[in-house]
Image: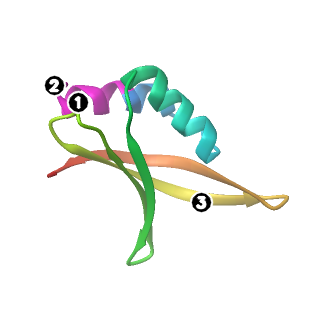
């Protein structure tokens, strides 16, 4: 089992100042986790975030994002990353 807090720090460094499409984000997370995971986009109270779930993480991870639409494509800029209870 991986410590989600340590993983969050690594992910923060990797994603800093980078606009992702969903497939690009999934690919980078896959490269780091090297196992199956679930990534779901939520929009609650005008805040968008991806919830990252994996059996090898001790907690779930929330990636808070700004959504940017350019030429019909959506990109996500990660603002902050937090752990949350499973």
Instruction: Give the residue furthest to the bottom.
Output: 45
Q: Which tag, 2 or 3, sits closer to the chain's start?
A: 2
- Does the magenta run of residues contain 79? no
> Measured along the vertical axis of the image, is residue 57 above or below residue 64?
above
**Which dot marks residue 67?**
3
Task: Give 29 or 46, whichever is nearer the viewer.
Answer: 29
Instruction: Tell which tag, 2 or 3, sits nearer the viewer.
Output: 2
From the viewer's perspective, is 49 left or right of 66? left
Give the residue number, with chain letter if any, for mark 1: 56
Q: Secondary structure at mark 1?
A: loop
Relative to 5, say whether 68 is above or below.
below
Magenta range is: 1-10
Q: Position of residue 81 (x, y in %)?
A: 34, 44
Label 2: how many Cα within 10 Å (few below 14, some 14–19, many 20+): few
With respect to residue 30, does 24 lie above or below?
below
What residue would you read off at disc 2? Answer: 1
Please provide percent x and percent y for residue 15. 50, 33
Marking on residue 29: none
**Residue 17 in view:** no
Q: Residue at x 17, y 27 (%)?
A: 3
Residue beneath the point at 24% across and 46% down: 60
């Amino acid at each position: 089992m991986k410590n989600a807090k340590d993983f969050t720090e690594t992910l923060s460094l990797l994603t800093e100042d980078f606009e992702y499409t969903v497939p690009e984000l999934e690919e980078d997370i896959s490269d780091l986790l090297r196992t199956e995971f679930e990534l779901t986009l939520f929009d609650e109270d005008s805040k968008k975030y991806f919830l990252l779930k994996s059996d090898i993480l001790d907690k779930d991870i929330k990636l808070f994002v700004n959504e940017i639409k350019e030429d019909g494509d959506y990109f996500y800029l990660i603002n902050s990353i937090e752990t949350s209870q499973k």
